[in-house]
């Protein structure tokens, strides 16, 4: 474990032994601070893929674009599918890693949102392992609609790589729920999703 200070906030990093694996890195997203952290922590040879609106994030959006990371237009499903296919091909051809926010957008409250399926599709096409990065406390460091970074302890925890080389396309929903449940297990109560609509905190149906 090591501690660093960024923007006046103490940062604890756990599981750093999993941080240099060629993989699909995924990360929960509750603050613009998340982008700063992942750009600092991801290994060289890693590209990002995010919604095109990321360019409007103050400072970090511009840095993201200048670093030649990828953006997709989610308003056009066929274009998004083609982007995922092209991204997967580039990752395999160039021996790259990927960083992606599986929620697809930033949580307004810090609580974990449902995961979209794009990162699973990429895993099926690349067969790269998935390394979850669990971020705690970033929603307190930079709150929504605020221009000021507040002091708050932050934690980044890498979970062990999840192998995908034997995954089956018919089980996409199962994989999404499984990895979402991992995040629920490792997040504090204040960042767990609220139980609603007949679903438990892990995003699974109670029926």
Image (spheres, rainbow, N blue to C red):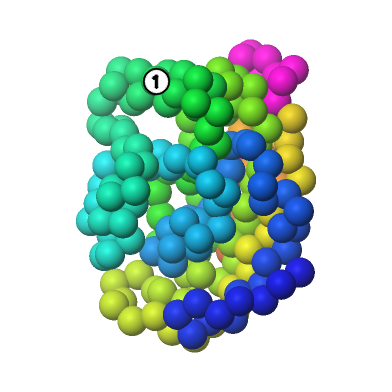
Residue placed furthest toward the left: 56
- Seen from the viewer's position, the closer of residues 84 and 116 is 84
**Where does the magenta region start and end?**
164-171
Q: Is residue 69 above or below residue 155?
A: above
Question: Which residue sits at x=68%, y=41%?
Answer: 21
Question: Which residue sits at x=31%, y=34%?
Answer: 72
Residue 52 visible = yes
Residue 86 lies in quadrant: top left
Question: Which residue sits at x=51%, y=41%?
Answer: 45
In the image, is 113 to the left or to the right of 131?
A: left
Disc 1 designates what residue? 86
Dominant SS of magenta comes to loop
Q: Is residue 22 above or below residue 160?
A: above
**Quadrant (top left, top right, bottom left, bottom right) of the N terminus:** bottom right
**Quadrant (top left, top right, bottom left, bottom right) of the C terminus:** top right
Q: Position of residue 202 (x, y in %)?
A: 66, 47
User: What is the number of callouts on the image?
Assistant: 1
Q: Magenta segment: does it hold 131?
A: no
Residue 194 visible = no
Q: Position of residue 104 (x, y in %)?
A: 42, 43
- Seen from the viewer's position, the closer of residues 119 and 9 is 9
How many residues crowd mark 1 within 10 Å: few (<14), some (14–19), many (20+)?
A: few
In the image, is 112 to the left or to the right of 159?
A: left
In the image, is 171 to the left or to the right of 55?
A: right
Q: Is residue 177 above or below residue 67?
A: above
Q: Position of residue 157 (x, y in %)?
A: 68, 60
In the image, is 101 to the left or to the right of 179?
A: left
Q: Tell me the SS state at disc 1.
A: helix
- Seen from the viewer's position, the closer of residues 136 and 89 is 89
Question: Which residue sits at x=54%, y=22%?
Answer: 92
Q: Is residue 151 above or below residue 79?
A: below
């Amino acid at each position: 474990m090591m501690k660093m200070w960024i923007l006046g906030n103490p940062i604890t990093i756990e599981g750093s032994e999993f941080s240099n694996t060629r993989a699909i890195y995924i990360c929960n997203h509750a603050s613009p601070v998340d982008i700063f952290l992942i750009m600092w922590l991801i290994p060289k040879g890693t590209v990002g893929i995010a919604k095109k609106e990321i360019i409007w994030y103050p400072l970090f959006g511009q840095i993201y674009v200048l670093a030649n990371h990828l953006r997709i237009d989610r308003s056009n499903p066929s274009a998004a599918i083609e982007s995922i296919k092209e991204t997967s091909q580039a990752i395999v051809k160039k021996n790259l890693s990927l960083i992606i926010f599986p929620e697809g957008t930033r949580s307004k409250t810090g609580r974990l949102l449902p995961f979209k399926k794009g990162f699973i599709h990429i895993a099926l096409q690349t067969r790269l392992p998935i390394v979850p990065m669990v971020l705690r406390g970033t929603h307190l460091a930079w709150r929504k609609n605020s221009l000021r970074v507040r002091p708050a302890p932050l934690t980044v925890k890498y979970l062990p790589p999840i192998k995908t080389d034997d995954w089956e396309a018919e089980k996409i929903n199962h994989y999404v729920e499984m990895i979402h449940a991992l995040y629920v297990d490792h997040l504090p109560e204040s960042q767990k999703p609220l139980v609603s609509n007949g679903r438990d905190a892990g995003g699974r149906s109670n029926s």
